[in-house]
Amino acid sequence: RKEVEQDPGPFNVPEGATVAFNCTYSNSASQSFFWYRQDCRKEPKLLMSVYSSGNEDGRFTAQLNRASQYISLLIRDSKLSDSATYLCVVNEYSSYKLIFGSGTRLLVRP
Amino acid sequence: GAVVSQHPSWVICKSGTSVKIECRSLDFQATTMFWYRQFPKQSLMLMATSNEGSKATYEQGVEKDKFLINHASLTLSTLTVTSAHPEDSSFYICSATTEQGARGSYGYTFGSGTRLTVV
């Protein structure tokens, strides 16, 4: 079983749509959670951290359910520039390792 | 903000030769460096973790004699792919952090990646 699992997509949505991505992780001792964005042939860039209370950054909302070991990302009012691969990432606190999910590809069409 | 400079950005080499990839932290001291590999349409797979001045810790299935990692200073880590073969063609990315940065969750800085093609 993969440590971090995501639906690979692609999600193909029109501009303005709302889209949600889900992620599950297997290590219950994981401490920190993130969503990263990766554009084609580029390095991943931190989109936002994910907190148990849920957090929002503009059009992006992240949620964490520790009991279910489940993380989500909601993107509202999708823009063409949101087209990218979204990576769910978990931090192993004791080793500082970042464990990446396989990513969910989003395509936003005009 | 923190910057990690990774070079080269791309390299083509002949099968059997060795390639060295460098990552430098420009404005902070990276106590820990992570090396990842990413094949097309796959996610980043952690290859190894290196701490300054000590031997790297390799993930299961990664050949330490093939992927030589050196972290001799707090600002420089290198990955050498020895006797490269076409199956080693991939996107290699480093990520640097400090203990404080890692605990604070924001302190991971990625290099821009190196695309290696072995022919």
Image (spheres, rainbow, N blue to C red):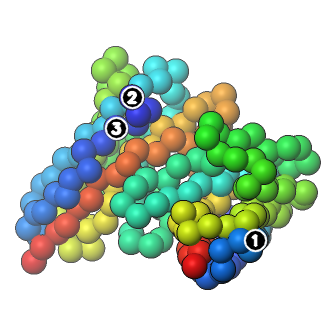
Q: Is residue B112 visible?
A: no
Instruction: Describe the element under mark 2 as helix, strand or loop.
Output: loop
User: Pointer 2: what residue?
Assistant: A1
Q: CA distance from mark 1 to mark 2?
A: 34 Å
In this image, B54 relative to B111: left or right?
A: right
Give the amino acid at mark 2: Arg
> Does residue B56 sit above or below B81 in this rendering?
above
The image position of residue B106, as x and y in percent, is 58, 49
Identify the subunit bearing mark 3.
A
- Identify the residue under disc 1: B18
- Which of these two is toward me, A42 or B114? B114
| Front-most of residues B24 and A2 | A2
Q: Residue at x 75, y 47 (%)?
A: B64
The structure residue drawn at horizontal position 51% and vertical position 41%, both measured from the top left corner, is A99
Q: Do the residues at discs 3 and 2 belong to one chain?
A: yes
- Residue A48: image x %, image y %? 42, 50
Quick check: A37 above or below A41? above
Position of A53 with respect to B110 (left or right) is left
Tell me the SS state at disc 3: strand
Q: Are marks 3 and 1 on the same chain?
A: no
What residue did someone put label 3 on?
A: A5
Expressed as whole percent of the image width and height from the top left, the position of residue A18 reads: 12, 55
Q: Amino acid at mark 3?
A: Glu
Q: Is residue B18 visible?
A: yes
